[in-house]
Amino acid sequence: MAKLYFYYGAMGSSKTANALMTEYNYAERGQKALLGKTNIDTRNGIYKIKSRIGLEKDCVLLSDICAMEDEALKGYDAIIVDEIQFAAKEQIDFLARIVDELDVPVLCYGLRTDFQTNLFEGSKRLLELADEIKEVKTVCWCGKKATCNARYNEQGIVREGSQVLLGANDEYIALCRKHFMEGKLHEE
């Protein structure tokens, strides 16, 4: 029986690398997995998923997956979607329908919360609907589990602004809740 999976973690927890390795594992076993990402993530090109450690693969957009016919979707052994936090509620509902009606597992990877610790729309809906929710863990500079995504600049942690600002290690850092609340980006 297929399931809807949500793998979430803070920035730098290897979510994208895990998504790419999962797709590779399906291919290695002669199975066909559809690799996708949300339309907002254009950092590495529109149709490419790339992890910080250099793994990369061509992909399709979530909007394309949502426009596919059922027969085409049933041709896959799994659907894997990266940057799922940027998905709309309706897109998550569509992915749940793929699981429930077409019996195709859907594995979603993304952030749970933004730089203000607010849920993203896609993540919120997955927390409501997913059959399995698993954390991909990473650590703060202090060694504790990192759960917060801090946006920063040369003045320190940024607490105001648009929910979506695409960036990587140059604009975001994963922190434990204590250091996020204190605004400590590193040991002083």
Image: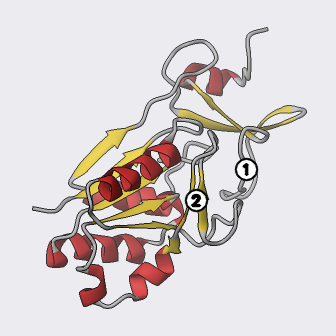
Label number found at residue 3: none
- Residue drawn at x 24%, y 89% is 71
Label 2 packing within 10 angstroms: few (<14), some (14-19), many (20+): many
> In the displayed image of the protein, which residue is found farthest to the top?
188
Where residue 128 appears, as percent x and y from the top left, is 29, 58
Q: Residue at x 41, y 71 (%)?
A: 89
**Would residue 61 appear left or right of 102 to someone viewing this image?**
right
Q: Position of residue 110 (x, y in %)?
A: 48, 51
Query: For the residue labelled by badge 1, is the local secondary structure a helix, a strand or a loop?
Result: loop
State the image quarter where residue 12 is shown: top right
Whether residue 87 sits left or right of residue 28 in the image: it is right
Q: Quadrant of the C terminus?
A: top right
Which x, y percent locates residue 81?
43, 62
List the residue tagged with mark 1. Answer: 167
Near mark 1 (Cα within 10 A), the count class, few <14, some 14-19 or many ≥20, is: few
Q: The residue under label 2 is which amino acid type?
A: Ile
Which quarter shows the N terminus? bottom left
Q: Residue furthest right?
A: 154
- 1 or 2: tag closer to the N-terminus: 2
